[in-house]
Image (cartoon, grey):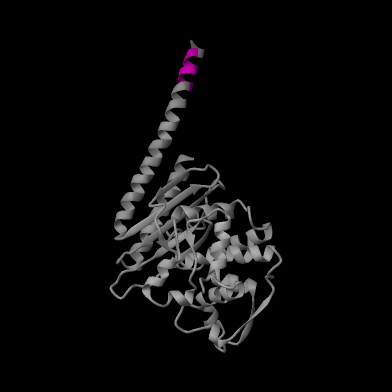
Amino acid sequence: MHLRKSLFLGVVAFVLLPMIAMAQVDSLRSRIATISQAAGGKIGVAVLGLESGDTFSQNGTGHFVMQSVFKFPLAFYVLHLVDSGKLSLDSMIHVTRRDLPEDTYSPLRDKYPKRNINISIRDLLSYSVSQSDNNATDILFRVIKGPIKVQNYIRSLGIKDIAIVRTEAEMHGPWSVQFQNWCEPVAMIALLKVFFERKYLSPQSSDLLWKLMTETTTGERRIKGLLPEGTSVAHKTGTSGSNGKGLYAALNDVGIVTLPNGKHFAIVVYVSMSKLDIDARETVIAKIAKAVWDYYVNAH
């Protein structure tokens, strides 16, 4: 009798667990859809449980403007060149006033008002990734001979649905130019996955890029906004200006979140073509990240 009961309970558990998991995924999907309605524009979301392999996406194959998110694949490529012996992190690059224009976001320029300096590749990466410095980014593009090099390298990894063809300076031109640097949410998730799995960079380069992304100073109210204080998030943001009619092409955050149990999930959230102010759009990203956090904390 006890054996029959045990077998019965085992069968029930076997049937119920997948059903519970499906219900939790459906609940997450519904919650994200509801949150997304508050964005006032187009939302692209992709999520991957990096240990479990769980996946979720909403508009995951749409083309979204990256803006400064492209500084993550740029750094990935630069570090690939370092690993290949074609660049050195300690190489010094001469920077002149011409390399540090005024009409862009640049902590590097602000730190060196005389604008005639030598700076290492390592420090340029730090400014570009951690501080999202536009001038440092374009100096790196100059060193590697253009953004197309980054695009071609990332595509060589099997991540095809990404386009990186314009510099920061070029994106400060006509409104339409920024749309030429785009990426599908699921493609960015794929890049975060190979980064996390340390497949293509050396351990030293992987560690450095992880450090630079966890030290990101921008977008504190996006992915990290509603997560418990002290949560480790390795991420890169992207932000556009408006077109003069109050329409914003991009407010983005992509990254890897470390859970309390030591596991991780990758998340990509693109908020596109919205007229809402930055606080409202950042809140949408924060709420989506918190919904995913709750899913993993409660379900796993």
241, above or below 1, in the image: below
Marks counted in the figure total 0
Question: At 47% from the left edge and 56% from the top edge, which residue is drawn?
Answer: 161
The prevailing secondary structure element of the residues shown in magenta is helix
The quarter holding residue 280 reads bottom left
Q: In this view, does 293 lie to the left or right of 33?
A: right
The quarter holding residue 155 reads bottom right
41 falls in the magenta region:
no
User: Closest to the observer: 283 or 1?
Assistant: 283
Question: At 30% from the left edge and 76% from the top edge, which residue is drawn?
Answer: 244
Question: At 40% from the left edge and 67% from the top edge, which residue is drawn?
Answer: 179
The quarter holding residue 212 reads bottom right
Res. 264 visible in picture:
yes
Residue at the far right: name it. 85
**Magenta-tinted stretch:** 4-10
86, above or below 115, in the image: above
Res. 227 visible in picture:
no
Question: At 47% from the left edge and 77% from the top edge, which residue is drawn?
Answer: 169
How far across and down, in percent of the image, does residue 210 sit? Answer: 59, 60
How far across and down, in percent of the image, does residue 114 sit? Answer: 57, 89
Q: In this view, does 206 lie to the left or right of 170?
A: right
Residue at the far bottom: name it. 114
User: Closest to the observer: 223 or 238?
Assistant: 238
How far across and down, in percent of the image, does residue 8 sit? Answer: 46, 18
